[in-house]
Image: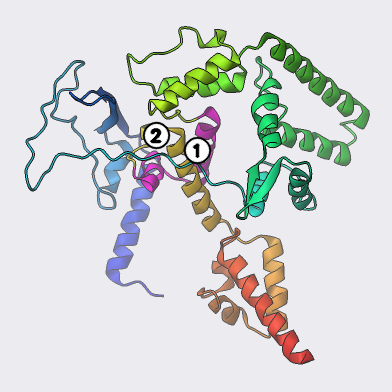
Amino acid sequence: MALDDADARKLYRLVRAHTLASQMAPSRYLTARIHAAVEGFSRPLVGTVSWRVFPGWEAVYGEFRSEPDTEPPEASLEAGAVWPLDPEGEDAPNPELIEDETQPPPRFRRHTLIKAMKDGGIGRPSTYARTVEKLEERGYVEMEEGALAPTERGRAIWLQAAPLYVRDDSGAELFSADFTARMEERLDEVASSSEAPAARTWEEWRDEIRDLHEIARARKATGKATPRTRERLERLLENAPPGSEAPLDPDSLTEEEARGWMERLREAGVSPAPSSRQAAFLERLVEELGLSSQEAAELIGLEDLTRIQTSAQASALIEELSALREERLPPSRKQIGLIDRLRSEAGLTEEEAAALVGESALSDLTGGREGSASALIDQLLERTKKAASGTTS
């Protein structure tokens, strides 16, 4: 499709802006976190406000993006400042309190659990379905309206046993995706290289699992809070309002005491801060997609990644970025080969096949489970089934 002069000029300006921005300094923002109280209202109010103090690379994008605030708010940000509320009027009524509960993330279904295993580097295509079946056979999960719901046995394993098997010095967890993926990577090395002898590899894993088991036995005997529980408590304390009650020494708490503090903080409306794993995964996704901090944060209505305060916000952004990554994935070689075979069997040209999913050419197809390549395969398979049915009838 040809571009007119206006489109060509705009495209040139965008390419030029990208080129210049890649050589410019980062933009800088100041962010103030505000804790306030309203007379006659028991709950604290927490929020943030940010403004840009140095434009950096954003200076060349004025045509393509709205300008952020560059001045702090007019209201005083000094500790102890008093902000009078605007008088209520017909056009500007005072806000009303609407209480709502944060919804938990949806439970895994068979296909979403398999996708999580793939993303975590766990298992092989031939073992995914069997692994999920084992969870059901051993009574760890049960099906509820198409979702995998944990049973009492499954909850006990995860909440009581798994947290005990964690090293304090390295943070290594026996019941974790990282541990399993690392083990499978070593097994692959044994299968493909003589540099990783099977006997020595077995002894190393045996010793590591034995050490974790001894750590678990000692930790259970002392009753101290597990590293996982302490980490979750610390994330809640990070978002607790100033002056709120908190344990003097979280590291000295027992598991029961730590869980009690966590329950009190949740009842007070405190949400946990993002975990280090969420932060690292977000950073990796943003870098992989080539987005700026502001562009990524805008996907969930925030101005900058520094505005992410809760684990729920981090999870929402991870979901958005993961979907965006899926959209940008090119088709796999397996998909391309299958499309070529099915297209030939259906007697379609490349252009005719691409048109089935609204694309002008096969080179425009996108990969991933939700991509146009997957949609085209479904359509071609359906055509093949109909053709076979018509032949045999």
Quarter of the image where the C terminus is located = bottom right
Tell me: 263 left or right of 391: left
Q: Main SS type for the magenta part?
A: helix
Mark 1: which amino acid? Leu
The magenta segment is 275-301
Query: Is label 2 in a helix, a strand or a loop?
Result: loop
Q: Which of 360 and 74 is in front in this view?
A: 74
Q: Residue at 39% of width from left, 47% of height from top?
A: 299
Image coords of residue 364 (percent x, y): 54, 68
Mark 2: which amino acid? Ile
Q: Nearer the viewer, residue 360 or 215?
A: 215
Quadrant in the picture for residue 145? bottom right
Query: Is label 1 in a helix, a strand or a loop?
Result: helix
Residue lying furthest right in this view? 199
Q: Nearer the viewer, residue 290 or 110?
A: 110
Tell me: 197 left or right of 93: right
Magenta run includes residue 299: yes
Relative to residue 7, is residue 86 depicted above or below?
above
Residue where numbered disc 1 is placed? 282
Tell me: 257 left or right of 62: right
Relative to residue 275, is residue 58 depicted above or below?
below
Q: Residue at 80% of width from left, 23% of height from top?
A: 209
Quadrant in the picture for residue 52? top left
Tell me: 365 left or right of 246: right
Residue where numbered disc 2 is placed? 308
Image coords of residue 142 (percent x, y): 68, 47
Task: State if disc 1 and disc 2 touch (CB < 8 Å).
Answer: yes
Quarter of the image where the N terminus is located = bottom left
Q: Residue at 56% of width from left, 63% of height from top?
A: 371
Image coords of residue 253 (percent x, y): 55, 10
